[in-house]
Each structure stands twice: as structure tokens, then as C-alpha cells.
Image: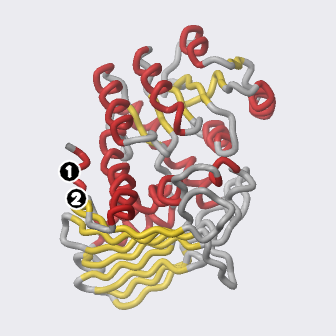
Amino acid sequence: MATLSGALIGCGFFAVNQMHAWRDIDGASIVAICDRDPERLRIVGDQFGVAKRYTDAAALFSAETLDFVDIATTVGSHRPLVEMAAAHRVPVICQKPFAPTLADAKAMVAACAKAGVPLMVHENFRWQSPIQAVRAVLDSGEIGTPFFGRISFRSAYDVFSGQPYLATGKRFIIEDLGIHILDIARFLLGDVSSLTARTARINPAIAGEDVATMLMDHESGAISVVDCSYATRLAAEPFPETLIEIDGSDGTLRLAQGYQLTVTGKSGTMVRDISPPLLPWASRPWHNIQESVLAIQRHWVDCLASGKEPATAGADNLKTFALVEAAYAGAASREPVRIDDLLK
């Protein structure tokens, strides 16, 4: 397979994980990087041996012949950068939050569709190996048809020291973390017809909400509860684990803290340790997220090579983004929100 030439735009906190993953993937290579901060550009460029460095994205697109671009900047720059990539006919991966608004997200999807280039959102939580293991159990039919699910992420981990901008935005946990947990709910239980939400701000030092609880009706008939918190102090800190409970017509599934999966179904009860692998460049407790970055980027390369649409294509991700918008709207109105109304 020919090696695809890519560029990374944005050399911040999380982008280092993406660079490690690109280095591990056969069939793709980052040949250029771009960041407005020359120091971050120097640090990442030197660490990963990338000689071509740009402080301006327009200059990058003009000078380089690229097979894809990986956009790892903050949300406000996503739309202009995605539209710039589309204008140059360059396939694009975009970090989440995908866009500031659903209207921006729709415009970005439309721009790439018009240009005929693939667009994938870096929605990596569903690619964590424990989440994939849960999906495999559901696909096996072992617990029958799911009718209830709870997908939970509750922690008191200090996420602000590494990403201080998270403390300043009026939107926080749903936009930054909840989007992943909502996407997991969609991945496991199917698309959502309506959503009810409640939020709270427990930490007085931040601007946005740090607790959110969402109740969702899935088109399959299942009901799910998605709950997220960065204000929950526990004896054993679970960060960054997502805990899952699913009840089905023939059994139950529980993904507990410590990556312990218990399935009670047609074949009896089975308990497994499904801990994610610790990659050579990864570190605990981030290793589950770091291995999912490798998995989703490998998926992207496979899709580019085969011409298949990515699982988290921009068009599909609009359905996850709509859940985020519905959660904020529902928390404000304290009324259920119909998802189809947002996607029109």
C-alpha cells in the first residue's frame, strides 16, 4: 500500500497523541505540521522529526501536495480550516468539538461533500477496545435485544491543568466530554429520537457546566441514561474510564471500573478483564484514550485506501452533534427535545 502524505494542523496538548499514532501506522506519514505558535511548532517538529513547518494554514495548503490533513486545533477555527481543505480537495479529519454550532457543522459537511472529499470527525471514544468489546457482545446476541442502557463517566480528575481553556468556556462537560459519551450511546443502542437533559455547575472556578445527566429515547425502542461529571470524588479515581450497563431481553452486560466486563446471558455468566493495551508511547491512566487514537487513525487510513466511508464520517457525526445541541437546549428549557427537528 502506498504511503499517504498527511499534515497536522494544531500542535497542542492532544495532538502529540495523534503524532505518536501516525508514526505507528503503516501507510501514512505526517510530512508537514502547522501551528500559529512557533514554540509549539518547534517542540512537535523536533520530537517527531518533521522538517516542514508552517505558521499559516493557507501557506501549508499552497505549498504541499497532501493526501489528507488532520485538524487538531480548537473549535473556533474548525470551519475555516475544513472549508480550506475542501477547497484544495484534501480529505480531512477534524477534532471534536466538531464546530461551534450545528449550522457550522452542517456547512462543513456540505463543503466536503461538494468537493467530493472524505470528512471524518476524530470521535475516538467508541474506538476504545473495551467499548468495541461491549459492541461485540451486543452483536453476538448473547443478551438479546437491548432495552435499557446507562453510559457513565464520573470523575474529579483535574482536566484544567493540561487544557486551561476548558475552564473559560460557557459550555464545558457536554461539549468536551459528553459528546463522546453520547456517541457511545448511539454506537451501542442506535440513533436517538428525543433527549431530556439537566446540568449543574459545582466547581465555582469554571464558567461552564461540570455535571450533566441526559435521558434518551432511541429509535430502537431502548432507553438510555448518559451521565457525566467532573465533580465526583471517589475512593478510587476512575478517570478516564467509561462505565456501561446494558439490559437486554435475554441478559445483562456490565462494564465496571477496572475494565471488568460481566455478561449474564444465554450461555450463563462470563467475567473478563478487557483492559486496553498499554502502547509503548502511552501512559496510565490515559492509555485507553491513546490506544483509541491509534485505532481511529488506522481506520481512517484503511477507509482512504478502500474508498469506504468512515464510521464517524462528518454526515454521521451530525447526529451526535445534534445530541449535544439538544442537551444544551433541553437543559435550558427543561423540556424534551426532538432530534429530527435539529437535523432538518
- Residue at point 48% right, 35% down? 93
Q: Position of residue 86 (x, y in %)?
A: 40, 21
**Vertical comparison of 93 with 244: above or below:** above
User: What amino acid type is highlighted by mark number 1?
Assistant: Asp
Decide which of 237, 286 is in the foreground and name it: 237
* Secondary structure under the numbered disc 2 in the rendered image: strand
Residue 88 is left or right of residue 190, and the answer is: right
Q: How is the image coloured?
A: secondary structure
Q: What numbered label is drawn on residue 341?
A: 1
- Residue at point 33% right, 30% down? 107
Please name the residue that numbered disc 2 is placed on.
338
Q: Where is residue 290 in the image (x, y as percent from the top left)?
A: 62, 53
* Secondary structure under the numbered disc 1 in the rendered image: helix
- Residue at point 36% right, 39% down? 314
The crowd level at tag 2 (other Cα within 10 Å; few <14, some 14-19, many 20+) is some
How far separated are the C-alphas under marks 1 and 2?
6 Å
Quadrant of residue 172 within the rendered picture: bottom right
Which residue is at the far top?
63
- Residue at point 21% right, 61% down? 193
Which residue is at the far bottom?
268
Q: Where is residue 285 in the image (x, y as percent from the top left)?
A: 69, 65
